Image: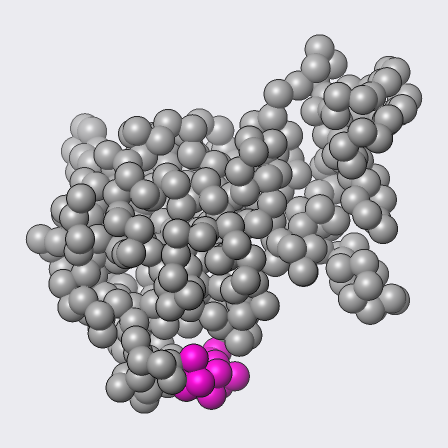
Amino acid sequence: MDNNKYCVIMAGGIGSRFWPISRSTHPKQFLDILGTGKTFLRSTFERFSHVVPTENFLVVTNAVYKDLVLDQLPELQESQVLAEPLGRNTAPCITYAAFRLRAVNPDAVMIVTPSDHLIINELDFVHVIDESAEFVRDHDVMMTIGIRPDHPNTGYGYIQVEPTGPALSKFNKVKTFTEKPNAEMAKVFVDSGEFFWNAGIFIWRPNTILEAVERFLPDTYQLFDSISAHYGQPDEDEYIQRIYPECRGISIDFGVMEKAENVYVRCSDFGWSDIGTWNSLYHYSPKDENGNVVPHNSALYDTHGCIIKVPDGKMTVIEGLDDYIVVDKENVLMICPRENEQKVKKYIEDIKFKTGDRFI
C-alpha cells in the first residue's frame, strides 16, 4: 500500500435533509440509515482502507462530534481528527486538511471524500481511486470523480466534460460545473452524453489545491497560512479556534473548482448515490409488493410507494397512503408526501423558530 496516499473524510455536516432521524447531536454520518449494521462513517473508512493506510486518514468534523468519530473509528489517533469549531462549508475544511498534510508529507496525494455515500461496486470504486491517484501524482491537476448518469436526477450537480472524440476517455478535462438543474435541463444533460453526476470526491496534491485556494480564495488561504508553523503541533487546535470565526463559509466547488482551469474528471460507473434525501434512500432500499419500504412490524392497507421509519419493535398500522414519508423518531413524528421532501429544511426552520432547538 502506498504510504503517500492520504484520505480526508469530511464528516461535519448535520444531515438536515434526513431529519428527524438525523439530529444536530447525532447527524446522518454517524447513523446506520441503510440498515447494514455499519454507520455511513464506518463504511466510508472501511472502503478507503483498501487504498490508504490507517495512519494516513484524517477526519475533519465539527468539534462537538470529535468523540463520536473516535468512538466509531477506534483505529484512529486523536491527532487524526481535525476539529472545526464552526461549520464553514467545504472550502475551509479542505484548506485546513491540505495545510496539515503539506506539513507532514509534502509528497502526499490527498483523496477527499464525503462521509455519507453509498458505493455499490466497491472493487470498481477502489480501482478508480487508485488510477486517479496515479494520474494526479504525475500531473498538476485537480481531479474529481464523475458518475455516468442513468436518469435525469435533479438532486445532483453535473460536470460537463470537454469532447474528446467518439468516446470519452477515463480522464477528461472539465468544461463546466452546473448546480442542481430543473427536470428539463437534467434530461438534456443526460441525453447529451457529455454530463456526469458530481460525486463530490476529489484527488489532488496538497500544493496543487493550496495554490488554487491562494488564487481564488485569497482570504481563506491567508488565514490558514498565517498559522503555518502550528500544523501538526500540540497547539494546532488553539490556533484553528482563533482563525475559524474569520473564515468565509463557501464550498470548494463554487470557490475553486468552477473557476480553475486544471480540473479533470475521472468518468466512472461503480454504482453511486449520496443518499442525501428520503427519496434516494427509498430508491436504494428493499420494498414490499406494493413498493413500500417498511419495518418488520407493520400492517399496511391500500398503501403504496411509502417509506416508513419507526423505532424497532413498534407496530405500524397505515391505511390509504400513497407515496408518503412517515418517520417516527423520539419526540418527532413527520408525515409528508415524498414529492415534498425538499420542504424538510423549511420544517426545521419553522420548528426552530417556534420552539428552539429542542426538536432539532
Residue drawn at point x = 72 percent, y = 37 percent: 339
Q: Determine if the magenta segment contains residue 269.
A: no
Given residues 156 and 138, the one toward you in this image is: 138
In the rendered view, how is the structure colored?
one colour
**Number of callouts:** 0
Residue 239 in sight here: yes
Q: Main secondary structure of the magenta part?
A: helix
Give the vertical position of 59 relative to 235 (above or below): above
Q: Which residue lies at the image location 47% right of the left edge and 36% below the top edge?
A: 118
Which quadrant of the view contains residue 288?
top right
- Tell me where residue 42 appears, x and y as whole percent: 47, 44
Front in this rendered view, residue 115 or 167: 115
The percent coordinates of residue 312 (x first, y second) are 76, 32
Picture residue at 52% right of the left edge, 64% below the top: 66
Quarter of the image where one finds residue 235? bottom left
Is residue 53 found left or right of 154 in the rendered image?
left
Q: Residue furthest left?
A: 138
The magenta stretch is 237-248
Say whether residue 135 is left or right of residue 28.
left
Q: Position of residue 329 (x, y in %)?
A: 79, 44
Q: Is residue 124 above or below residue 61?
A: above
User: If the image is split into quadrants, where does the C terminus sit?
Assistant: bottom right
The x, y position of residue 224, in whole percent, is: 35, 81
Task: Look at the image and tell me in which quarter the N terminus lies.
Answer: top left
* Residue under the point 67% across and 60% down: 25
Which one is in front, 74 or 45?
74
Look at the image and tell me whether residue 337 can be seen. no
